[in-house]
Image: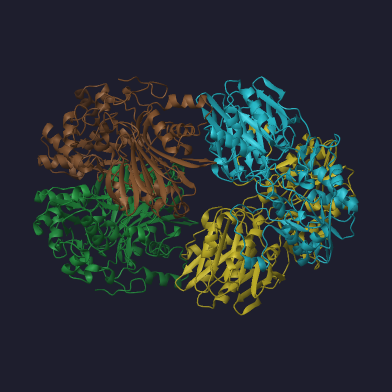
Chain colours: A brown, B green, C yellow, D cyan
Amino acid sequence: MLAEIRGLNEECGIFGVWGHEDASQLAYYGLHSLQHRGQEGTGIVATDGEKLKGIKGEGLVSEIFTQEAIKELNGKAAIGHVRYATAGGGGYENVQPLLFHFQSGSMALAHNGNLVNATALKSQLEAQGSIFQTSSDTEVLAHLIRRGGFAAFKERVKNALTMIKGAYAFLILTETELMVALDPNGMRPLSLGKLGDAYVVASETCAFDVVGAEFIRDILPGELLIIDDNGFRSEMFSVASNIAMCTMEYVYFSRPDSNINGINVHTARKNLGKRLALEAPIEADVVTGVPDSSISAAIGYAEATGIPYELGLIKNRYVGRTFIQPSQSLREQGVKMKLSAVRGVVEGKRVIMVDDSIVRGTTSRRIVTMLREAGATEVHVLISSPPIKNPCFYGIDTSTKEELIASKYSVEELREIIGADSLIFLSTEGMIDAIGRTDDGENRGHCLACFTGKYPTEIYPNADHPYEKV
Amino acid sequence: MLAEIRGLNEECGIFGVWGHEDASQLAYYGLHSLQHRGQEGTGIVATDGEKLKGIKGEGLVSEIFTQEAIKELNGKAAIGHVRYATAGGGGYENVQPLLFHFQSGSMALAHNGNLVNATALKSQLEAQGSIFQTSSDTEVLAHLIRRGGFAAFKERVKNALTMIKGAYAFLILTETELMVALDPNGMRPLSLGKLGDAYVVASETCAFDVVGAEFIRDILPGELLIIDDNGFRSEMFSVASNIAMCTMEYVYFSRPDSNINGINVHTARKNLGKRLALEAPIEADVVTGVPDSSISAAIGYAEATGIPYELGLIKNRYVGRTFIQPSQSLREQGVKMKLSAVRGVVEGKRVIMVDDSIVRGTTSRRIVTMLREAGATEVHVLISSPPIKNPCFYGIDTSTKEELIASKYSVEELREIIGADSLIFLSTEGMIDAIGRTDDGENRGHCLACFTGKYPTEIYPNADHPYEKV
Amino acid sequence: MLAEIRGLNEECGIFGVWGHEDASQLAYYGLHSLQHRGQEGTGIVATDGEKLKGIKGEGLVSEIFTQEAIKELNGKAAIGHVRYATAGGGGYENVQPLLFHFQSGSMALAHNGNLVNATALKSQLEAQGSIFQTSSDTEVLAHLIRRGGFAAFKERVKNALTMIKGAYAFLILTETELMVALDPNGMRPLSLGKLGDAYVVASETCAFDVVGAEFIRDILPGELLIIDDNGFRSEMFSVASNIAMCTMEYVYFSRPDSNINGINVHTARKNLGKRLALEAPIEADVVTGVPDSSISAAIGYAEATGIPYELGLIKNRYVGRTFIQPSQSLREQGVKMKLSAVRGVVEGKRVIMVDDSIVRGTTSRRIVTMLREAGATEVHVLISSPPIKNPCFYGIDTSTKEELIASKYSVEELREIIGADSLIFLSTEGMIDAIGRTDDGENRGHCLACFTGKYPTEIYPNADHPYEKV
Amino acid sequence: MLAEIRGLNEECGIFGVWGHEDASQLAYYGLHSLQHRGQEGTGIVATDGEKLKGIKGEGLVSEIFTQEAIKELNGKAAIGHVRYATAGGGGYENVQPLLFHFQSGSMALAHNGNLVNATALKSQLEAQGSIFQTSSDTEVLAHLIRRGGFAAFKERVKNALTMIKGAYAFLILTETELMVALDPNGMRPLSLGKLGDAYVVASETCAFDVVGAEFIRDILPGELLIIDDNGFRSEMFSVASNIAMCTMEYVYFSRPDSNINGINVHTARKNLGKRLALEAPIEADVVTGVPDSSISAAIGYAEATGIPYELGLIKNRYVGRTFIQPSQSLREQGVKMKLSAVRGVVEGKRVIMVDDSIVRGTTSRRIVTMLREAGATEVHVLISSPPIKNPCFYGIDTSTKEELIASKYSVEELREIIGADSLIFLSTEGMIDAIGRTDDGENRGHCLACFTGKYPTEIYPNADHPYEKV
């Protein structure tokens, strides 16, 4: 269930374009299509080759950028960012891209991911006199680049990249070039596209469709791509090793119309549902999915089993930041907010409810109750991923094992807690098979850390990450 | 396709509650669940039995009402309104409920529908010295009631109701009662529910689910229901005749989790899709629906034919009022906004695209093109309703037959215009059967005017309605 | 002291222009110069000869009107209003001008003053079926005009004017003319000016200076002036009788650069100060005035006595609506807000503090204390008008005799209450002489009701005016 | 004339408090009383001894801080800033106090003045890897402090202060202390006060009066004052030399109720007017001052000569940032905005107009014309300071000698340009005598650079300061 796991994970979305006269506008539409990756804040920095200008704010893409704002951001290149939550908390100053002006030029950075050694690097830099303006780990890279002495800019960027650890996809914009970097484990999706003579980069390919760009290829783990007026050239700043694309991108985070490493997300999810049908064939009258992220898996399950897929749960589209929460008393009287069960569909029926994951369990319990109150005679909960038992260090600061309900209870206990007639998780094998990503041996190319506790990188225990490596 | 036909029709949503200490909060959640019926403006008027207070504004429910606003609207009863477009144009003053203060008390009105003789009545009232503060036809009813002389309030309301013609569902709130009226043809949905000791009224039953209320019954055509601290009592101000519930409520307008006259909307739509499978069996690889209103029909078609249902089209959820439209040049380069085709799903496939209606045809043409550009080898368009050939006078001011593409072209011409491989509309018989509403003889209980040109009421040609009765 | 008495009185400012291509802009600047007459709300209605358009809001002229707003209000004529407080309370709908649209045309009204028989007229109109949208007494005139049957518009306006009683200056704008009316007692200032070929009307002549217009003459009591494309013509709707210009306009309300009936306000105030020097010669070291309205009188006193005028009190200019009031604890620690005493000027000095009036006495006491705390050895309070002992019915609803401290205590008691070493009020004779307005016999042309209790019009005791005529 | 010279100079106002439970509220009122020193932006940073929190924004004190904001800024100490224009332009990030968070604690800075070697220092710091987030010269001090190695904080601050040159008054807040520093020439006013057990610091003593604090003493040139829970202690980081308080603080910038070095500003201005009466006795009918800053001098002139002081010019109080400028055409038709001449006062009179300075001359010409158009028969312009012939490097980046009209023309030429009957500037000797500041030998303790071209510090010609030392 998207909303719930989001409390756990802090993904972002980034978009860049070089060589188009409407660069900022394209960034606007690109970011807009990546809005599901982050609704807390957004910004665009553009360059006309002479200087860098930026606009950012806390809110949605459609709220922050006015027609006038986009016009002011004229130029041939731009990078943008949508932000979910942050390492270091909220606040205007943490909204990205971060923009730095020097007497010798400017530089902007946009980052998706989380650095695991940011705290240590920051301590060192501050001891040397650096002043940080944000609590974002992104700023660490900027300081590392600026501290790089008299080497050429590209060398300083490459050196800086070798010092940071964790999951990251970076865009760096200067007056003369757009640099694109992906961490050596390739933990975040990042793709390159082409739009006429311009190049575009985005966290998800759905952004290419929206701006009319053509997909070229995915950015490689450990690759630094430099795009300028002469086209693009690629360098490796690290040998790719232990490829570990975040599995959750397929399971719930990315948009169904995006392709990650050539695999369509909707299709992957439908396959997760079909695989569930194999692993967990349940006798029931209707299949329903928790909107929005579990619809595809539910349809896959219905198709494989022949049980009709119905809209048993419906989501209210207009819940915004300013929505008034119902009082406890009204909640008890049955006031619902975001999700309601459709009585006309579930009454007197045995219902299979497909969801993508269980984090704290509270949402699942609430939905099961809702379905029963709407007249479902049985509620079977099928989860299209394995139990999440371990924290993620590639996008989360505070969550602990204690918060992950599956780390504390057996599946049977969990079933009882959420009040379902049955509860079945997809197997790890089943999940990987269904996603269908090419196997490359032992590691298989997926980050499965939240399921297995095996982390693809070192983890640095410290104030920010109070949990030791499992 | 929802967005398109909305240009044609001006529905609204109304919600009322009597006898609950959190009346305004319930109205807030109720209106929120009716938000799909109108996003231009919203208001709530509440009473504590002593006076009427109201708050309204142009925007979404979640934007207009703050926690403080709802607190100010304390009291035991409230009515609310969400507004789509208006007879008489936009503007703050036209946002409903309309609230009138007199030295002897106050009165608030909320209206869903359109009066066909509003202009004539207004002329007469102004000649007698009435001053109208809005251009809304709703205000006409208020003046008719106030002009009613020394009769009791209820009699004045009943007399006023006999003077207005058209489609209407009215809520009238005073310090002592909540009145509920439905036009004699029953053209708009309006239901009564119960929440503990309180009564609620709403345009759609989904509002009952959201506030935890229990459905009692639908309001009858020609009925005036009076709710006060003693419960409710019913009177008929007109003999119900020529029952004509708007078919489009089933086809695209209502929420899938609502029941209209006992029929679940999602189920009705799925049946429309299944009936399409009978009337228009096409050989294809995938079925896709135009989100959001055609998803259910597409799933029904897929279920009946065995062709897999896929997310071939995806809608961006975050397009708000302030969204920047792409320039013509960017549009031509392929920048999309609201809807995109999913290449990973449709590429190399024969695609069946199910939509709910065609109004101007431009949206259909755009989607067909989009699907082809994403690699669909064939695009078959199936419409889950008959061609719309006639204007609607029960919620529209300006649209003309010329704007309705189906009134000018044959289906084959239309197919060519939108660029589809095939185009098939559901038959009127098929539609009515699929909806499954109880037959009551000749008229069958549906308003089919936009398909057949047979209007259930008189039509008054005048400046506002330049078209004669067909 | 301006702020204090304002609680008592509700003046407004009005401005009109006919025949200028930048009519709304002129209204903007004119209203801006009248801003001291009301800061709660403002509006402009303009006409291009075809229709009337208006913009209004709660706030200052510079806050409500943007460049775009003024552009939208294009046309050749406009009327505008700044509002202080209102008969009937605040609220957007009460902000003027009131704008009414009829099928046969439109009409806008702006009003300065207060009707004493509004309640009675409203009762009658509602009984006949009229619906009032505001609680403003201005709307009564609109209904009276509309009820006027089939007579010509001008006749209906004149008939309506004969039915209303009290103090009023009205502007009425239609597509074809601008009507200007002043009550038969001439209780409010209202002047006519010329700017090129255009005519302007304003509550104060300072508005003429600001827009570069030339003063022509004052509007006469009982006069209806009709301005259209052919120039202006005058009719009397009532015989002027018992002329009674509000004395307080000279004493504190109008701007010092305005002339009322040919007398400059600053000069009148300086003369009030000189007269005070005759009536109340005090031995002291410095003279200071309570800003802003008492500065002129203080300078006059200093000039007449030879005691140096100093800035002993200073006002903070930037106190807006949103200013945070200091907590009680901070107040006690000496936190000041709007006014401070200048220690460098008053320390060790015998101070004469000139103020324009005493209403509740609290402000005077506060200032005296402030001066003493800043080191003044003596504080002598001189008031440039007589004691206010009676409520004003020409601009006030709720204030009672009890609130007027001078109606309850002798001057000596008052002196003790405010803690001054001496307290002297100007005599009524002295005030009238100093203002220097031409005597026209018995009545002398001033409204002195708040000092003498002799009201120039009938007073209608009722719910709104609970006090009988004194 | 205040508005005009402000284009030339960029003063700011600062306020600090340590040891009061309502520290932020006091800062709010203190800044409010310093609002005349800067209206572009404002901020407050507070500490509860554990962390530093800040709120800032572009606008007035009363606009930026809400009740909630002040509550959030709870704690025992706070510093605040009001900003006029900036070295380095506008923008949110340049609004002060600047707030820096380090892993080891936080630091906030507020600065009034201008550093003449900021550019050189910044170049050096950037070459060493520092990243500047603002274009404000204030940030330079922060970096210098942070680069100070392992020395104690106080030593690092003192070292940093010895590296910066120019005019400055600094407040530095940490969790444990409030540091206060004034440049060795003492070019900016800065005073220390006491409020119960708390200490307050402010640019002007008027802030003490507003918050109820008692003046203790002025901060000394070259002094570093450290305030903490144990009281305050003073250290000198530089030998005070060449004391040079900005003369313009007395002439127009400070509030009349402030005392600078023990001299009341209103009294100083009145003395400037009296001295003008000696140096420039003119035969005339009325004396008027250009509001607000020249009123005191005009009153002094009137008192000394016996010519009556009148309100010949009036200023509209409600001109805010959003005020719409009149079009060229309306200007030509005589539309005025901020200042108008009072016909009732000047018509047919010989007028003496007292102003504080002439910068570009355009305002003076405009006022002279205005007075003549209002009927003045003669207009004599008396300036209460000598001609400004040289740019100021202690608060200005861009102005050039060319912009200073007095650097290009003789007084007689100037008189003709502004269209006055006579034009007389006060002599430098006269100005210094009138201000009455204690003489300390040759230098006399005033900065007279803009009059004499003799700068009290080195001037560093560079990109920011393109003018060589004169």
Seen as rendered, the residue at the extreme bottom is: C230
> What residue is at 66 percent from the left and 26 percent from the top?
D158
Report if residue B4 is visible in the image.
yes
Q: Quadrant of the N terminus of chain B?
A: bottom left
Residue C210 lies in what quarter of the image? bottom right
Query: Where is residue D275 shown, x and y percent of the image?
Result: 88, 48
Seen as rendered, the residue at the extreme front is: A151
Query: Where is residue D10 shown, x and y percent of the image?
Result: 67, 44
Q: Is residue A13 above or below residue A69?
A: above
Q: Is residue D149 left or right of residue C300?
A: left
Report if residue C386 is visible in the image.
no
Q: Is residue B355 left or right of residue D76?
A: left
Q: Quadrant of the C terminus of chain B?
A: bottom left
* Residue closer to the observer: A343 or A183: A183
Query: Where is residue B51 shown, x and y percent of the image?
Result: 46, 49
Query: Where is residue C338 shown, x and y percent of the image?
Result: 68, 43
Q: Is residue A40 above or below residue C72?
A: above
> What residue is at 52 percent from the left and 61 percent from the top?
C68
* Residue closer to the observer: A315 or A9: A9
Residue C470 lies in what quarter of the image? bottom right
Give the total number of marks visible in the rendering: 0
Q: Is residue A173 left or right of residue C457?
A: left
Residue C347 lies in what quarter of the image? top right
* Residue closer to the observer: A435 or B427: A435
* Residue closer to the observer: D444 or C403: D444
Q: Is residue A245 above or below residue D271?
A: above
